[in-house]
């Protein structure tokens, strides 16, 4: 099989490429990525010499390039996106362009050549939950609350519409918060590890009692594989962690303890506007229909993740050598 992976230089996409080349060594992968601030070829240095791996730099909004790449593959796995909620609050333009328009261009190409299309999406399309609400599932109505979530919801609806209108062979996954190696240090876990390592404060938004459901990136990517192999065309599958719902402040304290620091590093800062209170995923459809469930225990996965960042400090430092400092100042300036 020949796969076109969009956004393969990002966090989840690069882990997916490692995973896929290991588990399906006969398949050919083209990684198509614009290398925005979040794209990093250093995350793929282990696979560059693999004859079944190829990288193409480009924009998913570039219709001619997208059509020529899609024509030569069997399957598109679409990870490329602007993915950080805080950046979408500062300026949503790139989110609408990449997440909505880029997905539409890919869908048009997939339609032209009738290719299987797997769309990687998020649980944030479902909005947020109160402490006693039932978990999100595939039938939860869409209610996105951030510009990022709204752009992903728009892309999901386009993907669904191409199935209904054009019979395009699509599947969608909506997954909760991923953690693991190669995540850009703007997201909570790598940001806090990096700040602790540099003896900087940990900016906890609001009261720190927002709850996230954490899944190891390898479990997410195994789930995408299961959907590609066994998923029913036209269907959506929710993926999430097992017993891994945790308030941000508790997660922060776990990271502090894993890094042998103390709680004086915690600094409560102004809340994120429109901050989603709780995410929780019911992944029973994926278990029932595909036989998938997450395997990585959260405590073990978190410990290994901390170790990975500390052992790959060059990778972190290179991420922070670009526009990161300007972003950090803008996002975390005192007001
Ligand atoms: P990321 O920000 O780490 O990586 C995104 C990648 O897309 C980067 O390599 C970037 O260069 C590339 N890209 C951006 N704009 C592009 C364009 N116009 N053309 C081509 N490439 C472009 O994101 P991530 O965290 O790896 O997320 C990947 C996907 O998974 C996204 O669609 C995201 O919505 C979804 N998702 C993420 C999470 C999570 O916790 N990170 C959870 C559920 C779903
Ligand atoms: O649920 C899936 C989503 O998870 C993905 O679709 C997104 O791409 C991904 O970024 C993630 O979104 P979150 O907004 O939940 O992730 P983030 O790491 O930005 O924040 C996690 C929680 O930590 C959230 O409640 C906000 C809080 N936070 C985050 C940062 C960066 C802080 O308190 N301080 C911070 O500095």
Image (spheres, rainbow, N blue to C red):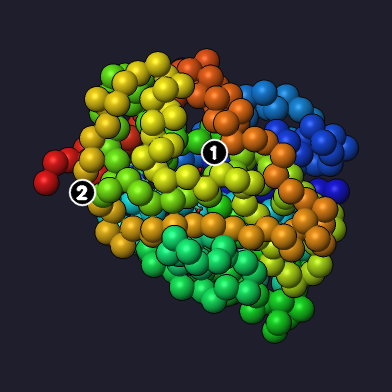
Residue that badge 2 annotates: 270
Total number of numbered labels? 2
Frontmost residue, 230 versus 127: 127
Percent x, y of residue 284: 72, 60
Are there few (<14), some (14-19), or many (20+) residues within 10 Å of tag 1? many
Percent x, y of residue 277: 39, 58
Percent x, y of residue 60: 56, 56
- Residue visible at 23% across and 35% down in the picture: 267
- Label 1 lies in ligand 1 vicinity (Cβ under 8 Å): yes
* Image position of 219 (left or right of 323): right
Q: Residue furthest right?
A: 26
Q: Is residue 41 above or below residue 283?
A: above
Frontmost residue, 248 versus 113: 248
Are there few (<14), some (14-19), or many (20+) residues within 10 Å of tag 2? some
Q: Picture quarter containing residue 165?
A: bottom right
Q: Is residue 189 above or below residue 75?
A: above
Q: Residue furthest front?
A: 132
Percent x, y of residue 150: 44, 68
User: Which secondary structure, mark 1?
Assistant: strand
- Residue visible at 67% across and 36% down in the picture: 296
Q: Picture quarter containing residue 294?
A: top right
Residue that badge 1 annotates: 179
User: Which secondary structure, mark 2?
Assistant: loop
Q: Picture quarter containing residue 108?
A: bottom right
Frontmost residue, 8 versus 265: 265
* Image position of 300 (left or right of 143): right
From this viewpoint, is residue 83 visible? yes
Residues at marks 2 and 1, CA–CA distance in whole angstroms = 24 Å
Marks 2/1 in contact by CB < 8 Å: the verdict is no
Frontmost residue, 157 versus 174: 174
């Amino acid at each position: 099989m020949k796969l076109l992976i969009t956004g393969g230089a990002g966090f989840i996409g690069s882990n997916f490429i490692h995973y896929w080349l290991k588990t399906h060594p006969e398949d050919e992968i083209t990684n198509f990525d614009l290398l925005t601030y979040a794209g990093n070829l250093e995350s793929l240095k282990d696979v560059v010499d693999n004859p079944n791996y190829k990288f193409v730099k480009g924009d998913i909004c570039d219709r001619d390039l997208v059509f020529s790449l899609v024509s030569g593959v069997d399957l598109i796995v679409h990870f490329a996106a602007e993915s950080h909620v805080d950046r979408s609050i500062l300026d949503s333009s790139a989110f609408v362009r990449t997440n909505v328009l880029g997905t539409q261009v890919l869908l048009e190409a997939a339609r032209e050549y009738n290719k299987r299309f797997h769309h990687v999406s998020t649980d944030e399309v479902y909005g947020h939950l109160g402490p006693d609400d039932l978990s999100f599932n595939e039938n939860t109505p869409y209610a996105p609350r951030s510009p990022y979530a709204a752009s992903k919801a728009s892309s999901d609806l386009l993907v669904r519409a191409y199935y209904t209108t054009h019979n395009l062979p699509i599947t969608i996954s909506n997954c909760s918060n991923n953690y693991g190696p190669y995540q850009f240090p703007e997201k909570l876990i790598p940001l806090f590890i990096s700040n602790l390592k540099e003896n900087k404060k940990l900016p906890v938004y609001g009261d720190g009692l927002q709850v996230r459901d954490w899944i190891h990136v390898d479990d997410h990517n195994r789930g995408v594989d299961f959907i590609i192999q066994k998923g029913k065309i036209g269907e959506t599958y929710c993926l999430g962690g097992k017993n891994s719902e945790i308030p941000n402040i508790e997660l922060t304290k776990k990271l502090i303890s894993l890094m042998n620091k103390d709680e004086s590093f915690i600094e409560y800062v102004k809340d994120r506007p429109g901050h989603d209170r709780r995410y929780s995923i019911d992944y029973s459809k994926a278990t029932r229909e595909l036989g998938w469930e997450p395997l990585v225990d959260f405590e073990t996965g978190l410990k290994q993740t901390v170790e990975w960042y500390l052992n790959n400090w060059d990778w972190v430092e290179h991420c922070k050598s670009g526009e990161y400092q300007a972003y950090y100042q803008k996002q975390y300036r005192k007001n």
